[in-house]
Amino acid sequence: MKRIDLNCDMGESYGAWKMGADAEVMPHISSANIACGFHGGDPATIRKTVRLALDHGVAIGAHPSLPDLQGFGRRVMKISPQEMYDLVVYQAGAVEAFARAAGAKLHHIKCHGALYNMAANDEGLSDAMVRAAKDLGAMLYVLSRSKNFEIAKKAGIAVCGEVFADRGYSDDGTLAPRDKPGGMIEDAGSAVKQALAMIEEGYVTSLSGKRVPVAADTLCIHGDQPGAAAFAKALRRAFAERKIEVGAP
């Protein structure tokens, strides 16, 4: 039987500003990546999202970002490997503390937005991210078949290759820009079709039509995507029909 982890970026509301439909999505996923306050989230939201994850038996992960609240962590900044390490440890430590206070543990770290993409094929940033995860004793979720994945494997830490149900891909296996036509998949049926190809057949079709090999350990849907709950439900229905088991690694 095939098995996949279904993860979602969550806890991105802060103050009076609301983002996503966490309560509706949480029952359908197996891992939650919880924003740490730098692109979204705040202490109360972290606490509530950790509690929601525990109530549904969902693995608790940290979702650290560049310090870019206004740009939602999606604008590239030039940072050093040491800054990468510090950003990940600082932010993941916040989620870890709330998890520990609730009687749970931090399961994984998955960086957000530009920080994630910057590290995907940058050796220095990848190494720093891996060291941070190793020092915190957490699993790492990184882009499938990326340099980041290779460096984590060589370091001997637990790592999952991540693929995306709701994003278009470039020919090199990286995510296509969000503002490019096809960069965001907004139809649940198309997302399911892409997810099944990645899980069952090990490839994704790029925006140019090229078959790009992937290794799917964990599948992401975005909590800020309109209709995220509908996407999650559609994926779970398809997985049940194909006898694909869903569970955290």
Image: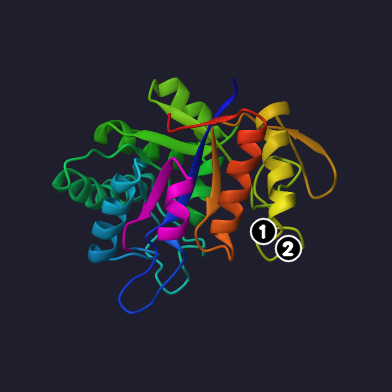
Q: Residue at x 14, y 48 (%)?
A: 101
Horizontal side of 96 relative to 148 (left or right) equals left
- Mark 2: amino acid: Lys
Q: Is residue 176 above or below residue 143?
A: below
Q: Position of residue 70 (x, y in %)?
A: 43, 74
Residue with the mark numbered 1 = 177
Whether residue 190 is visible, yes or no, is: yes
Q: Based on the picture, tell me whether residue 149 belongs to the magenta stretch.
A: no
Q: Residue at x 46, y 38 (%)?
A: 141
| Camera-side residue of 117 and 242 | 242
Q: How many marks?
A: 2
Q: Which residues are the magenta region?
A: 23-37
| Camera-side residue of 246 and 67 | 246
Based on the displayed image, in which of its 4 quarters is residue 1 positioned? Answer: top right
Q: Is residue 71 above or below residue 211?
A: below
Q: Identify the secondary structure beneath mark 1.
A: loop
- Mark 1 and mark 2 in contact? Answer it, CB < 8 Å: yes
Q: Which mark is residue 180?
A: 2
Q: Is residue 219 above or below residue 67?
A: above
